[in-house]
Image (spheres, grey):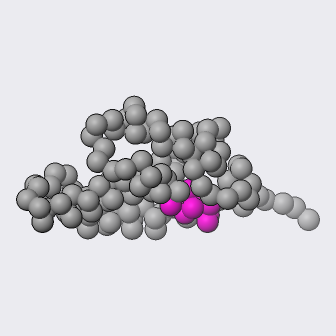
Amino acid sequence: MAALSSLVGRFLDKERGVANILAPDSVTAQAVAAVSLYAGYSKLSAGEAEIDESLDITVSEWAEIRPLFLLYVERETALHMEATAMLGASGLGRSSSEVAGDINQYEADFARRVFFFEAFTV
């Protein structure tokens, strides 16, 4: 298990490094949003703890949450790039609406992927 903040820190330091234009707080907010959606369909191993950057996430939970987190970060990055276009910066990568389409598709399939209910017999 690892705290969500350490998973975000690893993403910022080791995976994206200088390629990330988002503030760490913004990236953390995207991770919290992805974990919140996951928690709506599957019980977190941390139990009923508050979902914030200190929440402990297992490797298997992060394996399901991470792709959605990456899409959220990509959308937020695209929104920032589109906002700076007014200042003359040229955008790279996909637009926020293109990423939003992938997010909608992934979220629609998320319940099927992660829903869990313990079976019991009477």
| Highlighted magenta segment, given as a residue range | 33-41
**Residue depicted at x 53% and y 49%:** 64
**Residue depicted at x 28% and y 37%:** 18
Identify the main secondary structure in magenta.
Answer: helix
Residue 38 location, quadrant: bottom right
Specify whether residue 61 is in view: no
Specify whether residue 3 is in view: yes
| Percent position of residue 103, x then y | 38, 63
Q: Residue furthest top?
A: 14
**Residue depicted at x 84% and y 60%:** 120
Q: Is residue 27 left or right of residue 51?
A: left
| Percent position of residue 21, x then y | 29, 48
- Whether 12 is drawn above or below 29: the answer is above
Q: Is residue 59 left or right of residue 31?
A: right
Q: Per the image, is 38 magenta?
A: yes
**Residue depicted at x 27% and y 62%:** 79
